Image (cartoon, grey):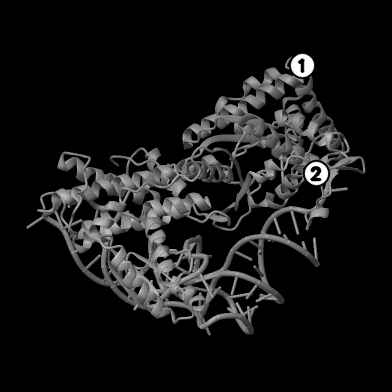
Amino acid sequence: MKRELETALAGCVKELFNVTATVELTRPEEQFGDYATNVALQLAKEAGKPPREIAEALAEKAKEKLVGQVSEASVAGPGFLNLKLSDGALIEALATDPSRPLAGQTAVAEYSDPNPFKVLHAGHLYTSVVGDAIANLLEQAGATVHRVNFGGDVGLHVAKNMWAIIQTLGGEDPEKLDEIPKDQRAAWLSGRYVEGNRAYEEDPAAKAEIAEINKHVYGLHDSGDRESAFARIYWTCRQWSYDYFDEFYARIGSKFEKYYPESQTAPVGLQAVREHVGDVYQESDGAIIFRGEDYGLHTRVFINSGGLPTYETKDVGLIIKKWQDYKFDLSVVITGNDIIEYMKVVLKSIEQFQPELPERTRHLTHGIVKLAGGTKMSSRKGNFLGAADVLQAAADANKAITGSEQASEETSLGAVKYAFLKIRTGGDIIYDPEESVSLEGNSGPYLQYAHARARSVLRKAGQESRKLPEQPALEAGERTLVRKMGEYPEVADRAAAELMPHHVCTYLYELAQTFNRFYENNRVVGDPREELRLALVSHYADTLKAGLTLLGIASPEKM
RNA sequence: GCGCCCGUAGCUCAGCGGAUCAGAGCGCCUGGCUUCGGACCAGGAGGUCGGGGGUUCGAAUCCCUCCGGGCGUACCA
């Protein structure tokens, strides 16, 4: 509807002034109309006429050309053109689906990226929730989306961990691992990581041992060793991590089709980097680097002087592997902001020998999760908020507010996801266990409740699905609701185009508020206008559900 | 030092070139349930949009600059 009108208005402009213009319609406040445009202001110079005069002429033309769709066209202020849609056009617009600009394309969405041997913290929960929503937006836009996950099962952090594990076990004694209860494994590994880090920083001897262990771990992958005591400890703890991840993702509803462990991307990256030493990468101080400085970026090490690949090279390998696996049209990588400059260097280096890969890659970033008090979290130091802690706090708040014995997983998870998603992706977000988990106001549960209530009305009326009449005469309250519902495809399109889920949140909340106001003043069941109103309620519930689904949030039928 | 990001009501945030565009939620104050689910609705108090310049018919929105905060800046991820 919006795009048809934009095209039609551009046609009017062409006809009147013989000027080709792109007309952009916006949603003004309802009192001004359903759509507005400022083309007249933009055209004033080119057409050599006062903007109001242009707008008046355009208004007349629009009324003439768009009769049936536009019921009023008026000029306001310095030359804004306001359009009011006919009730029929407004209802008709409800049949519009979000557009599919990526139809037929293959997209890869990589996100979450937890490291084995480490614990999942609040940031992983955040990035997973954001990643899920973005992947959903890509899917809505028509792409075939492959959700993948990347993580460091080799590297210095693993070496630090292995060092501390062996210390704690009192030697390379894999049997002793059996003594650690299943539900404590992740926390146990997390504790070892803290110890390993401390030793690495404070004890030169330990640091040297860790460097050796680092090589040893890479060696396991090269040799395929699964039998030595060291290998058994490594593979066992690595599996613990993946089991723990799977359990976590199942709980929050994330579905990855593939993990790319660094141990698999490292050899691919090493090969690519080594092939291009000289033309892309250089040797320097015994390491292989990429001179980002030549491109206004910073220089980074890809293979360290010990011959081991750094994260840079593993990422080169990852991008190449994704390309081999999916031949993607678009690859979206979702990470924290701290990696922005780093990623530019990696992509710039690949651009030198395989430019189509960076061309198709988009790096989307978000901020970190901060505690309300402003405490900075670090898994290296062990003072962080765990992903499980956030979910637990939400469940506790849910129990406290509802007064029930058991928290609703759908509702508490919905509260957390919505609290994360409603904020524009990019900046840091403040996590307040008290407020972020609210069930009131602009919150996930408010929307879930709104949905459940609408379904309840439909259940009461007997028939859950209703068709909208084609030639309705809408009352003011009904019209406001229909107008709001009609914005959904536009909002979904915008969110998908920008890959910004928060637009959906903002809209859904406004929609639910609009409905609640309508519902407060208008009877549905038993009213003479029941038939029409039930159809509106039905469409409203469907719209809420579509939006929540896009966000990865459940839409319970009852709460 | 250089690069990137952020600074909007007490708090958490939308708005990011347009007209009642100074907004929402929370918190605070006042009202509304013999009525389809009150996890709701109506109303009030509260901000010179970090400061200063500039561009424009028009700036929270674009540009410059300053202040404040965060992140990155060669062998971590």
Q: Residue furthest top?
A: A227
Q: Position of residue A256 (x, y in %)?
A: 54, 32
Q: Does residue A42 lie above or below A27 as drawn?
A: below
In the displayed structure image, the side of residue A99 where residue A167 appears, left or right: right
Q: Quadrant of the C terminus of chain A?
A: top left
Residue A518 can be seen, yes or no: yes
Q: Chain of mark 2?
A: A
Rendering coords of residue A358 (x, y %) = 68, 44
Amino acid type of disc 2? Answer: Glu
**Numbered label attached to residue A228:** 1
Residue type at mark 1 is Ser
Query: Residue under circle 2?
Result: A201
Percent x, y of residue A506: 42, 57
Instruction: Answer whether residue A441 is visible to the viewer in this image.
Output: no
User: Up-down: is A300 above or below A317?
Assistant: below
Residue at horizontal 56 percent and vertical 25 percent from the top: A182
Q: Earlier in the sequence, mark 2 or mark 1?
A: 2
